[in-house]
Amino acid sequence: MPRSTDTRTDARPRPADARRKTRPAPAQRLLDAATALFSDEGVRAVGIDKILRTADVARASLYSAYGSKDGLVTAYLDRLDFADRQRFDEYVAPLDDPLDKVLALFDLAASSAPGSGFRGCRYLNAVTEFPDDRTGMLAPVVAHRDWLRDTLTALLVAGGIEDAEAVAEDVRLIYDGALAGAKFDADPGPIHRGRRLAARLIGR
């Protein structure tokens, strides 16, 4: 019987090929790795080599996607800002009273603090590591702070609170202290106490 002259090979993907097709792109893997590492260990403590090993990408991918570690830090903070805004909007969506939405900020923080290991506010953690950077790498931190102030002000105005801008600054200060206290104590208690202070401040 003559041998077949068909030279085609088995077209089924090999396991490694299938894994490459289903894995996120290098830029996404870098951002995922950076988000986990920066949140757990801090920005300065995590070197580029550790990020590359965790993400399993080449160094060229980092420079191509983000330009530098600083660019990756900015992308990490941008992701936090977007996720936190979305999470807050979803959390308060069932609430009708705007003042209840103000206090929900503390409820959300208290419910999520244990899951994050009481590492505190990641925006504050980043600013603590880079105290002189506000408009460069840490610009998303400023944007997030502005969003929080503006959101609180709008809710307080809607709730009929006089001098809403000043009260929003006071609520934000209480919130900042509550997160710091929870980090010190490794306990959500300070966040609950902060909520009570904020409630008294706005007549709740």
Image (spheres, rainbow, N blue to C red):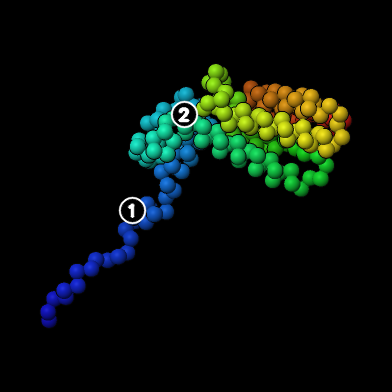
Q: Is residue 118 above or below residue 3?
A: above
Q: Residues within 10 Å of mark 2 (few under 14, many from 20)?
A: some
Please name whichever residue, 43 or 151, is drawn nearer the observer in this view of the structure: 151
Q: Residue at image x 42%, y 54%?
A: 22
Give the residue drawn at x 62%, y 31%. 143
Q: Nearer the viewer, residue 17 or 165?
A: 165
Q: Position of residue 186 (x, y in %)?
A: 63, 27
Residue type at mark 1 is: Ala
Determine whether the residue tagged by mark 1 lies in a helix, strand or loop. helix
- Circle 1 or circle 2, nearest the eye: 2
Disc 2, SS: helix
> How many other residues sit within 10 Å of disc 1, few (<14), some (14-19) or many (≥20)?
few
Residue extending farthest to the left is: 2
Q: Residue at x 81, y 29 (%)?
A: 164
Which quadrant holds the N terminus?
A: bottom left
Check the image and name the residue furthest to the front: 135
The image shows residue 71 at horizontal and vertical percentages of 47, 32
Residue at 42 percent across and 47 percent down: it is 25
* Residue kind at label 2, given as amino acid type: Asp
**Residue 106, visible in the rendered structure:** no
Disc tally is 2
- Location of residue 59 in the rendering, given as x and y in whole percent from the top left corner: 35, 35
Residue 134 visible in image: yes
Tag of residue 67: none
Label 1 to label 2: alpha-carbon separation: 32 Å
Q: Which residue is mark 2?
A: 70
- Where residue 15 sits, quadrant-wise, is bottom left
**Disc nearer the start of the sequence (1/2):** 1
Q: Which residue is mark 1?
A: 16
